[in-house]
Image (cartoon, grey):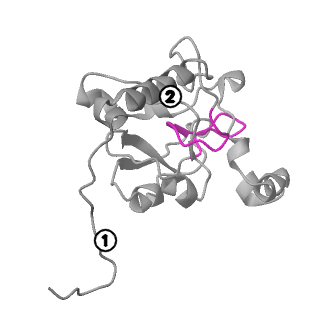
């Protein structure tokens, strides 16, 4: 029969030697490799006793930020929901009433802001799309639950607390150029 390509190899039916037929050297070699791994440094960690250090730019649970005066930064523009490829974000907008200036930064705010954590793929597109720097991904993990309904996070879980000492630092997620830009309080974006 004529060969189509020159890459085929001829396989020999060589008989096994005595040592190869009892498989003892192969078994001893395998055991040596297994025992060698007992004395190496463990690559696993004991959770929850130990915590693994995550990167500064780790993409974990979302947070809706407040400004320096404690007002919500989100203006319910909907760009985060539009940019989300998994369609995990839903919101309902409302207008600020007189006397609520201390709660909301702009005239429009989100009365309902929900993220379905089961759909979210933590891509960070919502963070990049937000013009008001209201939503950020943090290094926090999403808690495990037994029911699917509990994975829809509302404003009660997403908005950071009013107390300044309990707020989440996201400065490591911002570039040095952005941090320098934010120092200029004369710009309307930074007010």
What percent of the width, then of the height, locates residue 179? 79, 51
Q: Which of 13 and 115 is in front in this view?
A: 13
Q: Which residue is drawn at 57% across and 58% down?
A: 128
Label 1 sits on residue? 9
Q: From this viewpoint, which residue is outermost toward the left? A: 1
The answer to whether any part of residue 134 appears in the image is yes
Q: What residue is at 46 percent from the left and 29 percent from the top?
A: 29
Q: The N terminus appears in which quarter of the rendering?
A: bottom left
The picture places residue 180, in percent across and down from the top left corner, at 84, 55
Picture quadrant of residue 10: bottom left
Separation of marks 2 and 1 at Cα, in angstroms:
31 Å
Closer to the eye: label 2 or 1? 1
> Residue at the spot x=40%, y=57% of the render?
84
* Extent of the magenta region: 54-73
Residue 50 in the image: state x and y as whole percent.
58, 15
Q: Which dot marks residue 33?
A: 2
The x and y percentages for residue 158 are 48, 34
Magenta stretch, overall SS = loop
* Residue at 55 percent of width and 37 percent of height: 100
Q: Is residue 156 visible?
A: no
**Within-10-Å neighbours for mark 2: few <14, some 14–19, many 20+:** few
Among the two numbered marks 2 and 1 on one chain, the one whose residue lies closer to the N terminus:
1
147, 24: nearer the viewer: 24
Count of numbered badges drawn on the protein: 2
């Amino acid at each position: 029969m004529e060969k189509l390509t020159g890459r085929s190899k001829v396989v020999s039916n060589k008989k096994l030697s005595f040592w190869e037929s009892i498989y003892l050297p192969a078994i001893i070699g395998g055991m040596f490799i297994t025992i060698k791994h007992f004395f190496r440094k463990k690559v696993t960690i004991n959770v929850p006793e130990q915590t693994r250090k995550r990167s500064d730019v780790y993409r974990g649970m979302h947070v809706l930020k407040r400004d320096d005066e404690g007002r919500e930064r989100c203006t319910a523009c909907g760009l985060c929901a539009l940019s989300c490829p998994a369609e995990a974000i839903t919101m309902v907008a409302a207008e600020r009433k007189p006397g609520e200036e201390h709660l909301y930064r702009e005239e429009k705010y989100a009365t309902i802001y929900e993220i379905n954590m089961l759909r979210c793929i933590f891509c960070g597109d919502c963070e990049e799309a937000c013009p008001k720097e209201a939503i950020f991904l943090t290094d926090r993990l999403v808690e495990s639950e037994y029911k699917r309904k509990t994975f829809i996070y509302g404003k009660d879980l997403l908005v950071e607390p009013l107390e300044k000492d309990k707020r989440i630092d996201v400065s490591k997620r911002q570039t040095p150029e952005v941090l320098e830009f934010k120092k200029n309080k004369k710009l309307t974006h930074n007010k």
